[in-house]
Image (spheres, helix red, strand yellow):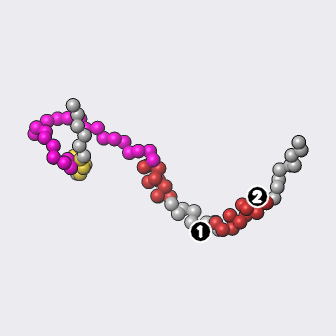
Amino acid sequence: MGRTIKARFTKGIFKPLEKVDITEGKEFTIIVPEEPEDRRFLDALKVTAGGWKETIDCEELIKNIYADRLISTRPEVKL
């Protein structure tokens, strides 16, 4: 039966991070999991973070949003 071990990939070589009892020269298949989608998203988010900084006045935007909510643009509902 298979076993899962932790290893580090350095300079093209997988080095186990724990003791393993494997015969020297034995060949086997290593399955490398893909990077999770959410991890790639977080990396992209970190790269773009702050891109909009100081391009708009956030306080003024919030004030305008609340002011617009006070103005009713919907027609009166008649029941």
Precedes in sequence: disc 2 or disc 1: 1
The quarter of the displayed image where residue 70 is located: bottom right
In front: 12, or 21?
21
**Dot 1 amino acid type:** Glu
**Dot 2 amino acid type:** Arg
54 on left or right of 17: right
Which residue carries the number 2 mark?
A: 69
Q: Which region of the structure is painted magenta?
A: 16-38
19 on left or right of 77: left
Which residue carries the number 1 mark?
A: 54
Please identify the residue farthest to the right as the structure is shown. 78
In front: 2, or 11?
2
Instruction: Characterize the magenta stretch by its predominant secondary structure.
Output: loop
Q: Quadrant of the C terminus?
A: top right
Location of residue 5 in the rendering, given as x and y in whole percent from the top left corner: 23, 43
How packed mark 2 is, by other alpha carbons closer than 10 Å (few <14, some 14-19, many 20 or more), is few
Give yes or no for residue 27 being in the magenta stretch. yes
Of the residues tagged 2 and 1, which is closer to the observer? 2
Q: Quadrant of the N terminus?
A: top left
Location of residue 58 in the rendering, given as x and y in whole percent from the top left corner: 64, 66
Kindly tell me whether residue 76 is visible in this rendering. Answer: yes
Location of residue 38 in the rendering, given as x and y in whole percent from the top left corner: 45, 47
Relative to 71, is 9 above or below?
Answer: above
State the separation of the CA atoms marked 2 and 1. 25 Å
Q: Residue at x 49, y 55 (%)?
A: 45
Q: Residue at x 25, y 40 (%)?
A: 4
